Amino acid sequence: MEKLKPKLFSVLKTYTKEQFIKDVVAGIIVAIIALPLSIALALASGVGPEKGLYTAIVAGFVISFLGGSRVQISGPTAAFATIVAGIVATSGLEGLAVATIMAGMILIIMGLLRLGSLIRFIPYTITTGFTAGIAVTIAIGQIKDFLGLSYPKGTSPVETMEKLEAVIQNIKTINIQAMFVGLLCLAVLILWPMVGRKLPGKAGTIVTAIPASLLAVILGIVLVSTLKLEVNTIGTLYEISNKPPVFSMPVINFALIRSQFGNALTIAILAAVESLLSCVVSDSMINSRHNSNMELVAQGAGNICSAMFGGIPATGAIARTAANVKNGGRTPVSGMVHAVVLLLILVVFMPYAALIPMPAIAAILFMVAYNMCGYKEFLYLIKTSPKSDIAVLVVTFVLTVVFDLVIAIEVGIVFAAILFMKRMSDVTQIEGWKYIEGDDDPDAIELKVVPENTLVYEISGPMFFAAAEKLLRISFYDSTKCLVIRMRSVSAIDATAMHNLEQLLQACRKAKVQLVFSHVNEQPMKVMQKAGFFEAVGEKNFCAHIDEALLLAQKYSEE
């Protein structure tokens, strides 16, 4: 079992000066990439732009210091944007802080209980569905700023469908200048990486090293400032602060804890899924292996610290982690450097963030939504998956867009569990042996000789509550003296199946039929012994092999 030991403490044993230089360079580059994204994601989350940087600084440093991955970069991500915006709109920043702290505690508990591997039990269709749904909600939420729309006083839609309705109702207020800036910034975001890939040698390397999002922001500032365009900027809508993050403990009470528990659980699940997925991706890039339980503990600590220093929920960011790896980062030092560089940028350059046009921010978030939507994988699952999986995928996606992420995850997991149980129930069979006379059937030579007045039933598959009622379908004749239950293919039973077996035993006793079991596996045997069923049936009536059971049945039939 993996020890809860941060990767930083392991890699420092063989750390070199050369690797330190590479980590510093990678950390600086990732910080430049994270700067516009952190601001944009904070605005999409309904909080001030500096709070995105607070999150990347505090949570980014803590998670890198304590984390179970060598190269994980953490901070605000698009996955949290819609749920954070909803919490802020309904419960304010205090509610968000409490939900984030609770989520951090849940993550730490998950890590301490070694539950890192349990994340794989969340179906891929659910993660694909809500990820695509989040992408759509982010895109819808940015239409207003991208087109420069004006809403009547008092109009402040929160839900995604409300935002879409407001866009449709106020589409006539479109600002051509804002749309012009947005389109140019979007063109830079799309074309700049393509240019970098096509240019040969050092030229391509240099172009690729300059983040398209940073270039789009600079272009937007230059256009609005030099051409004196009437376009909203961050400074016209928000107050800009260059103060470093300061410790502030939110007021916590029982009512707030109870009201935010569902949000906290959703944040914790999202943080766990996103961070561990990012770890898996980065492991394949550097041929390493992360410690999932330590990573959960680190994510929990990072989120608690983020909330206490004015930040929002954080998790592993796949794109920033990949950029870290591509630029030479190989230890948690690069993640810590990225946080320190962002702190310096916050203090020195944050006032200039007031000049960033809102259409440029919207364009960046459009690209974030496009990159995270995974539409190719979504369509592939629609084409190739079983109908039940398609249903889970579509339901999760629709609920995320129409309602919210909390409902989508809750319903998606319950729906997937019910469909899984139905599928398992369908493959669990209880069938009586068919008695074929003569040698005309090619399988006849393999049939066992069944004594007179004996019935043999074979159970295939796990016996749990969704399939347990099939036990009650077992029937016998008036002449039946012995009933043999063959359980070689039963890997597990639950309390409901055990209850139905007890009912079957009572029915056998009433009809004076002797019950015999063959090949009961380890887990079912333990359940039977614990329930007292083993003693009730009698030790001699549990046989290791079907041949022994049939010999015993022969004795009972002769009595």
Image (cartoon, rainbow, N blue to C red):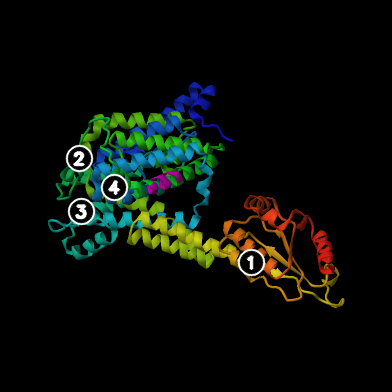
Pointers 3 and 4 in contact (C-beta within 8 Å) = no
Q: Is residue 137 above or below residue 265?
A: below
Find numbered disc 1 in the image and state the secondary structure of the residue it sits on: helix
Q: Is residue 360 above or below residue 426?
A: above
Which of labels 2 and 1 is toward the front?
A: 1
Find numbered disc 4 in the image and state the secondary structure of the residue it sits on: loop
Is any part of residue 323 visible from this angle?
A: no
Q: Amino acid at mark 2?
A: Ala
The kind of secondary structure the magenta stretch mainly shows is helix
Q: Position of residue 524 (x, y in %)?
A: 66, 54
The answer to which of marks 3 and 1 sits earlier in the sequence is: 3
Q: Amino acid at mark 1?
A: Leu
* Separation of marks 2 and 1 at Cα, in angstroms: 70 Å
According to the picture, the residue beneath numbered tag 1 turns out to be 471
Query: Which residue corresponds to the image point at 42% horizontal and 34% vertical from the top-left?
Result: 63
Which of labels 3 and 4 is toward the front?
A: 4
Query: Which residue corresponds to the image point at 65% horizontal and 65% vertical from the top-left?
Result: 506
